[in-house]
Image (spheres, grey):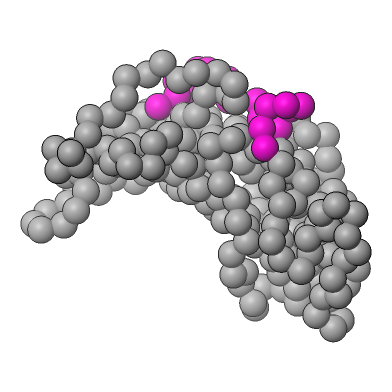
Amino acid sequence: MKNLNSSAPTLGGEGSGLRFTFVTPLDFRDGAAPTPGPVGEPAQFRAAVEAMGTASVHPRIELAPIRPPQRLAPFSYAIGAEVKHPEANVVPVDSEGDAFGRLILLHDPDGQEAWHGVFRLVAYIQADIDAALAGDPLLPEVAWSWLEDALESRGEPFTALGGTVTSTSSVRYGDIAGPPHAYQLELRASWTVGTTRLGPHVEAFCEVLASTAGLPPAGITDLRPRPRIADDQF
C-alpha cells in the first residue's frame, strides 16, 4: 500500500487517463442530440449528469452507472467505481488491493437547508489495506486530506464538506473464503456543489479511490512484487 507520507496520485491530467461515457439516454457522443429524459426531469440535472461523463480517470478504474437511491432527493443519479486487477485471471491469496466505491448525485430544485444548495454529491469508498497501514493512527486524518486536496486542486466550487473515515479489521473462522485476517478503509463523505460542471468532482473522487488502493500515477509502472497466486489457479 501507499506510504502515508507520499503524495496522492495526480489523475485526470491531459493524456493521463481515460474519458468514460455512460451508455444511457444521456449519451451525447459524436454530437448526437440529447434523448428526452423522464417527464419533469430538470435540464440542469441532465446537464450535471452529462458532465459526469466527461471525467478523465485512472486507466485501472472502471466506472459505470448504478441504481441510485430513490428517497434522498427528487432526482438522483449514481456511478459505481472499481479498481481493476492488472490480470483478470490472477487471484491473490490475500485480498489486499481490492477497492471500489460509488458517487451519488442528488438534486432538489427547491434546495435543502442542510445542503445550502440544490446539488449534493455523496461518496463512499472501501479499500483493502495491509495490517501496518490499518494500525497507523494517522490513517483517518491522511485519508480525509486526500479528499480535501483532490477537491481543492480541481478549482471547482464546493461547500459543506463532511464525512467519516473508518479503519476496520476482521477475522474469518471456519469454512469461509478469504484470508484469515482482513483490513479495510472506509470513507464516507458528502459535499454541496455550486455548478453543473461535475467532471472534476468525479475525477477528485477517483483520485481518492486510487490513493486508497495504492495505485501508481497513470503512466508509471508499478514495480512492487506481484502477489502470491493460489495453487489451484494453475
Looking at the image, is 5 positioned above or below residue 97?
Answer: above
The count of marks equals: 0
> 92 or 28, which lies in front?
28
Q: Position of residue 191 (x, y in %)?
A: 71, 52
9 in the magenta segment:
yes
Main SS, magenta region, reads loop
Residue extending furthest toward the bottom: 39
Image quadrant occupied by the N terminus: top left
Looking at the image, is 165 positioned above or below residue 121?
Answer: above
Q: Residue at x 61, y 34 (%)?
A: 58
Looking at the image, is 44 positioned above or below residue 157?
Answer: below
Image quadrant occupied by the C terminus: top left
Q: Residue at x 71, y 32 (%)?
A: 12
Q: Position of residue 60 (x, y in %)?
A: 53, 37
Relative placement, left or right, of 15 versus 42 is left
Residue 151 appears in which quarter of the rendering? top right
Relative placement, left or right, of 223 versus 72 is left
Magenta segment range? 1-18
> 144 or 202, which lies in front?
202
Q: Please indicate, yes or no, whether residue 206 appears anywhere in the rendered image.
A: yes
> 162 or 129, which lies in front?
129
Q: Please indicate, yes or no, whether residue 150 appears anywhere in the rendered image.
A: no
Residue 136 appears in which quarter of the rendering? top left
Q: Residue at x 59, y 35 (%)?
A: 59
